[in-house]
Every structure is written in C-alpha cells, then in structure tokens.
C-alpha cells in the first residue's frame, strides 16, 4: 500500500530475426482503471542505432532512459565511437541496481545494432539484465507472447516480422484493459532504425482483422 503501489499497464515487445530487430508497443497510460493518455511514446530513441522501450512507471522509464541517452552521447564524445548495445544496457542496469529497493518501477528493453550486429536486452528495476531473442514486457505481455510464440521464427521477412509485431500488440490491447491506443512498430537494421508504423489505431486493426476472418468485429 501507499504511494509506490500504483497499478501499471502496458504492452511492449521486441524480437530478433534475420533482418534485424522488431520493436512494437502500444500507447496507453493508465492509473488503475483510469486511462490517463492514449498517445504516449513508449519507444525512446536513444540514438540512430539504439532504441529503448518503456513499461512500468512512466516517469521512471522516461527519465532514466533519457539519462541513458545522455550517457551514450558522452561515450561517443569521449571514445569517438558509438557505444555497444551491451554497454548501453549495462549502464542502465547498473543505475537500476543502485536504486534497488527504493521503489523504481521499470521494465525496459534496449535494442540496437552495433559492430557485432543486432542485440536485444531486457533490463528491469531490480538491476536484472538479460540478453535474448524474444521479449514482451507489461501487463499485456502474456497475451502478446501467445501470438508472438505462435508466429515467431528467425527466417521471417521484414514484412512478416512487422505484421507479427503489430498483430501481437493488437491482440494484447484487445484482451488487456490497461493496453490500447495505437500500435507503433520500429525496425532496427544495419543502417540504424526505421519507424515502420508511426501509429495505427487498434480500433481500425480490430475491424481489419475481423474482416480477414469473415466477421464483422461486433460479435
């Protein structure tokens, strides 16, 4: 109970495939059953080759990932080369570890492309840091995983991968009341990241997917 016991809701996901990394997120901010916003940017653009995702406390994620942006830029200026994804995620994990037990609320993914190719890390408010190929974070993550695990394979084309990310987020927003708004999809590749879907309303997607199944969407 108390100040730090806020209910949080989000769906974010990331996965590595042959064409790089896909990051897909929703855009809803909620406080329990109250929807505070439908237009949150949950992907933080750290630099042209690095992305971070937000889940948990909006302020905590936003502040510390913007702080990470600054640290990454300082690294570039000092060492005259871009920071690796491993090092960037480690900086964030070390900060979270230092604040352990002090009530931070953060579940984040750090994705990017460096000298050694594409990398995806999960970092949370306990200082945990995991490298992996498929992650989903937030209250809607279980629903997203259901779709993601069914459709994921490493050989996906870019188009298939973007669609898998979009569809996974849509299904999560449909079942999870704390997720919703629009779907945003990013593609991380050799030349940096590209915003593939800047914001597609889940309501539109609902009827689109229903029509594909020969349904009205009002069933």
Image: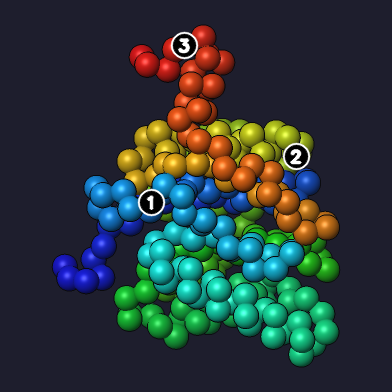
Q: Residues within 10 Å of mark 1 (few under 14, many from 20)?
A: few
Percent coordinates x, y for residue 100 in the rendering: 38, 80
Image quadrant where one finds the N terminus: bottom left
Percent coordinates x, y for residue 198 in the rendering: 62, 45
Picture quadrant where residue 105 is located: bottom left
Residue 131 visible in the snapshot: no
Mark 1, residue position? 37
- What's the distance in space between the residues labelled 3 and 1, CA to CA? 30 Å
Lateral position of residue 47 relative to residue 31, left or right: right
Q: Earlier in the sequence, mark 3 or mark 1?
A: 1
Mark 2, residue position? 158
Q: Earlier in the sequence, mark 2 or mark 3?
A: 2
Q: Secondary structure at mark 2?
A: helix
**Please, is residue 30 above or below residue 82 in the view?**
above
Image quadrant where one finds the C terminus: top left
Q: Residues within 10 Å of mark 3 (few under 14, many from 20)?
A: few
**Please, is residue 42 above or below residue 202 in the view?**
below
Percent coordinates x, y for residue 171 in the rendering: 46, 34
Q: Residues within 10 Å of mark 2 (few under 14, many from 20)?
A: some
Q: Please, which residue is most extreme toward the bottom here? A: 78
- Nearest to viewer (mark 3 / mark 1): 1
Residue 12 visible in the snapshot: yes
- What's the distance in space between the residues labelled 1 and 2, CA to CA? 30 Å
Residue located at (73% from left, 77% from top): 83
- Nearest to viewer (mark 1 / mark 2): 1
- What's the distance in space between the residues labelled 2 and 3, CA to CA? 28 Å
**Please, is residue 145 above or below residue 1 in the view?**
above
**Please, is residue 30 above or below residue 209 in the view?**
below
Q: Earlier in the sequence, mark 1 or mark 2?
A: 1
């Amino acid at each position: 109970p108390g100040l730090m016991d806020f209910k949080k809701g989000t769906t974010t996901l990331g996965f590595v495939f042959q064409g790089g990394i896909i990051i897909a997120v929703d855009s809803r901010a909620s406080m329990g059953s109250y929807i505070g916003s439908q237009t949150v940017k949950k992907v933080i653009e750290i630099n042209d080759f690095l992305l971070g995702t937000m889940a948990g406390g909006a302020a905590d994620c936003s502040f510390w990932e913007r702080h990470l942006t600054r640290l990454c830029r300082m690294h570039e200026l000092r060492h005259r080369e871009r920071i690796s994804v491993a090092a960037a995620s480690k900086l964030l994990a070390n900060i979270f570890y230092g604040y352990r037990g002090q009530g931070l609320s953060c579940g984040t993914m750090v994705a990017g492309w460096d000298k050694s190719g594409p990398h995806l890390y999960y970092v949370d408010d306990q200082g945990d840091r995991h490298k992996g190929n498929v992650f989903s974070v937030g209250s809607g993550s279980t629903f997203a995983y259901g779709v993601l695990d069914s459709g994921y394979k490493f050989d996906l084309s870019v188009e298939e991968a973007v669609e898998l990310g979009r569809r996974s987020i849509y299904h999560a927003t449909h079942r999870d009341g704390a997720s919703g708004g629009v779907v945003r999809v990013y593609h991380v590749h050799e030349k940096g990241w590209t915003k593939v879907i800047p914001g597609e309303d889940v309501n539109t997607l609902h009827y689109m997917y229903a029509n594909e199944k020969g349904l009205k969407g009002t069933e």
